Amino acid sequence: MQLLQSRKQLAAWRQGLAVPVHFVPTMGALHPGHQQLFRRAAEPVVGQRPAVLASVFVNPLQFGPAEDFERYPRDLAADAALAEAAGVTALFAPAVEEVYPDGVAALTAIHPPQGLQQVLCGRSRPGHFHGVATVVVRLLNLVRPNRLVMGEKDWQQLVILRKVVADLGLPVWVQGCATVREPNGLAWSSRNRYLSPAELEQATALPGALAAAAQACRAGRPRAETLVGEVRASLQAAGLVVDYVELVAAQSLKPLAVVSGVALLAAAVHCGPSRLIDHTVLMSRSPIVAIDGPAGAGKSTVTRAFAQRLGLIYLDTGAMYRALTWWVQQQGVDPADAAAVAPLLEGLDLQLSSGAGGEQQVTINGHDVTEAIRSPGVTAQVSVVAAHGCVREALTRQQQAMGERGGLVAEGRDIGTAVFPDAELKVFLTATTAERARRRALDLGQRGFAVPPLAELEAQIAERDHLDSSREVAPLLQAQDAVELITDGMAIEAVIEALVQMFRDRVPEEAWPNPV
Ligand code: PAF
């Protein structure tokens, strides 16, 4: 591991690198929580091993006049040993003059939006988040990393930095990593070092109270009044001095009266000489991802892989419409005749399940149609069947029932608009018609079907887009809050990685851990 102490040394190190750089900023006094961030930062992305740069810099800008800047623990030798053991490639440990050559008295500062920085910790630490945002932007400009890796423990800091990065258009992805805890439940923090053994014991009331509240929420008591009241009472009973206990929306940090979406129950307490923070993430159900988009955009392939990567159930609603179309054809019913199709929906037994190798299997009324539903005959008529109001209604109802507990990614045409309008992440995955025709030709060839000329496939795709977008019931529409992802020129792995990043921007690891 290289030790870099000046901007010049950092620039020389950075210049020689051909691999992505993942950056973990710290204030030193490193502990197992940091060690985990370093390990996570060292994980390969799309098969490529990154270089991991950690910084140790006690930033004077983020300490208030009565705070612990002077006595903040500093031990570079111990930090370097820990960082090296955790796979850090280079450690940047600059003096204050290296980071702020013109001093700190009249510095250009970053002011994150008031709504994010004057709540929770910002109320009792005025100026703190200006200091954090200013130093992180300064460090990002020096390091120019591809990824900024931070702990979810300092959730407000993470939300603010994501906003700063987005607003300033900085070309870096901010990755949040789950809080690491000591065996007694206490979140690792450099400030735990200030605590005596008795205070350490007392401090465990903080994670204990939050865990009990999470349990209460799961047991059907999701109101802020109840949750906050119970946490506050437990903290006070343990002799901790409460700074705040609040239930807020995890992204906007706005107060919530009841748990909805991704919620954060956060608390700060004074314990002996330390101010400690912690939180728990609460949701009324597990997360849902909606992936919509036109035919042939490669949704199925990437959604299946994305689901596997995050341990989500894969709900391929297109396969359900295809299976029904197959059944309609088998019954000799005219696919365009809604009145003739409607009776087939009564008592319909349509099942999606996972085969031994994780691949999806589709059965309808006892027939395994996994392969048959991919035939050109079904492809030609699925839009017609899917346009009937009675069909949409029946299958939407079944899909919503399948998604009641969440923990799934659903793919289709109207998932974000009609089936799961409250999904945590909505993506509109698309590609140009030319690109989709090319992919369709490849797929047909691989499945052993005849491959029509590309121009013909393009015309078919355009026609299908038109049918899907112009039908009266649940047309193909990009939900207002969906993110558009145009996949032309992107390798499948890159699309999956982009989806994972979007998911993680919205759903903390604590709420939905990565599968092991
Ligand atoms: O979380 C921290 O240790 C600090 O706030 C950070 C991000 C290194 C900025 O000084």
Image (tube, grey):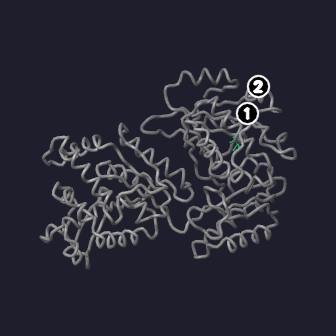
The vertical placement of 365 against 252, above or below, is below
Classify the position of ligand 1 by quadrant: top left, top right, bottom left or bottom right.
top right
Look at 27% across and 62% down and name the residue there. Answer: 361
Q: How many residues crowd mark 2 within 10 Å: few (<14), some (14–19), many (20+)?
A: few
The answer to which quarter of the image holds residue 362 is bottom left
Q: How many residues crowd mark 1 within 10 Å: few (<14), some (14–19), many (20+)?
A: some
For the residue marked with disc 1, what is the amino acid?
Leu
The vertical placement of 296 against 2, above or below, is below
Q: What separation in Å lies between label 2 and label 1 (alpha carbons)? A: 21 Å
- Provide residue 58's location: percent of width, then percent of height: 76, 37
Depth order, front residue of 512/350: 350
The secondary element bearing badge 2 is classed as loop
Look at 73% across and 41% down and name the residue there. Answer: 29
Q: Would you name the residue on which mark 1 appears?
A: 76
Q: Would you name the residue on which mark 2 appears?
A: 101
- Provide residue 1's location: percent of width, then percent of height: 60, 28
